[in-house]
Image: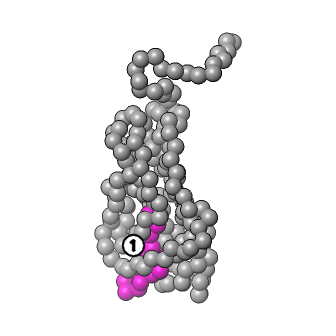
Amino acid sequence: MSKLFVDDIVEKTSNHGVVIPGHVIQFKQANAQNATNITTFNGSSGGTAIYGANLGGRTYVEAQSLTITPTSTSSILYCFGIVGWTSMPATATMGHGQIITLNDTTAIDNVDFPHYAHNYIASLQYYYPPTFAVGTFSPASTSAQTIRLRPFVYVESPNTAVGNFKGSALFVQEIAQ
């Protein structure tokens, strides 16, 4: 078996960068992991699905946002977002979760309504564990892409809901294909 030892790999003429399928080309992050303030937002029932999400009736806020410019049209963007939920009122018909959006038109929406309904879990308030969304986008573009982590609350009529989280993080890797 042969071994190749090098200090640098430098492309010769293409100026496209050295790309190895399956390897990370770039990494971006936006986080408030040690946040001391609680973000509170109010939700109400109704509404259609927005941001490319699977379900309607959700009220969203933006927890984190970053911009990444893919270096190749064949790359994928691997996204991981986490929301540090905290104590919330035990509202009947309430659930909560998060999505990750690409340019607010396509979503990684791999949750239904975790912890639904809040009043079945706790009679007063409960400190909810962190939850996450993970998945990929294939933008097929070398233009700047905006990735957002959007926590949400869901509630059915006639109720309103209050969402609380303390800390969040969004990580995006461009991976060569």
Compared to 156, does 6 lie above or below?
A: above
**Residue depicted at 52% across the width and 51% down the height:** 29
What colour scheme does the image use? one colour
Q: Is residue 154 magenta?
A: yes
Residue 28, horizontal then vertical, whole percent: 50, 47
- Image vertical order of residue 145 relative to residue 112, above or below: above
Q: Does 91 appear in magenta?
A: no
The amino acid at mark 1 is Thr
Disc 1 packing (10 Å; few <14; some 14–19; many ≥20)? many
Magenta stretch, main secondary structure class? strand
For residue 49, side relative to residue 80 (left or right): left
Instruction: Report the residue marked by disc 1.
Output: 59
Question: What residue is at 35 percent from the left and 53 percent from the top?
Answer: 103
Secondary structure type for disc 1: strand
Expressed as whole percent of the image width and height from the top left, the position of residue 91 reads 50, 84
- The quarter of the picture where the N terminus appears is top right
- Residue 167 lies in quadrant: bottom right
Residue 41 at x, y percent in the picture: 45, 76
Could you say which is closer to the camera, residue 131 or residue 11? 11
- Residue 47, given in percent of the width and then of the height, sits at 31, 73
Residue at the outermost top position: 2
Residue 102 seen in render:
yes
Q: Is residue 134 above or below residue 48?
A: above
Say if 17 sits above or below 29 in the image. above
**Residue at 50%, 39% in the rendered image:** 26
Q: Which residues are magenta?
A: 150-163
